[in-house]
Image (tube, grey):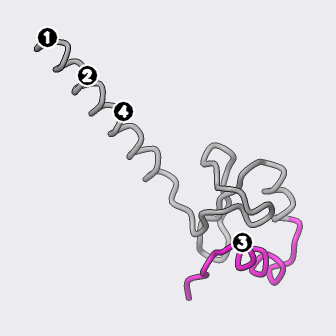
């Protein structure tokens, strides 16, 4: 019983560490996709925009965002809840 508990604790610690590292690796200025408003998915890519990392829910949204003017990009970020740093 002791070893089973120890194994569960060790596995939990490893999973927590892996999740924390993955989240820390990609910190975006936005929580929601600027195109669709869905939550950002780290594996779907990011881009640098005016000195900030912007995340997306899918690759198609990244392409749409890149095709917009800087003014349109800012408006889309604000529309979906991003408070742009100054």
Tell me the number on the disc at residue 72: none
Query: N-terminal of the two: label 3 or label 4?
Result: 4
* Magenta run includes residue 68: yes
| Image point (72%, 74%), residue name | 77
Q: Position of residue 33 (x, y in %)?
A: 71, 61
Label 3 with label 4: CB-CB less than 8 Å: no
* Magenta run includes residue 51: no
SS for callout 4: helix
Q: Is residue 50 above or below residue 2?
A: below
> Of circles 1 and 2, which is in front?
1
- Cα separation, mark 1 vs mark 3, equals 50 Å
Q: Position of residue 40 (x, y in %)?
A: 64, 55
Residue for badge 2: 8
Tell me the number on the disc at residue 1: 1
- Cα separation, mark 2 vs mark 3, equals 40 Å
Indicate the quadrant containing the N terminus: top left, top right, bottom left or bottom right.
Answer: top left
Q: Is residue 67 above or below residue 22?
A: below
- Cα separation, mark 3 vs mark 4, equals 31 Å
| Image point (60%, 80%), residue name | 83
């Amino acid at each position: 019983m002791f070893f089973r508990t120890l194994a569960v604790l060790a596995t939990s610690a490893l999973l927590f560490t892996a999740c924390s590292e993955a989240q820390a690796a990609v910190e975006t200025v936005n929580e929601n996709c600027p195109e669709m408003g869905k939550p950002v998915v780290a594996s779907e890519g990011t881009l640098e925009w005016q000195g900030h990392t912007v995340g997306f829910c899918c690759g198609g949204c990244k392409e749409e965002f890149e095709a917009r003017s800087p003014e349109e990009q800012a408006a889309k970020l604000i529309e979906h809840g991003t408070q742009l740093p100054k």
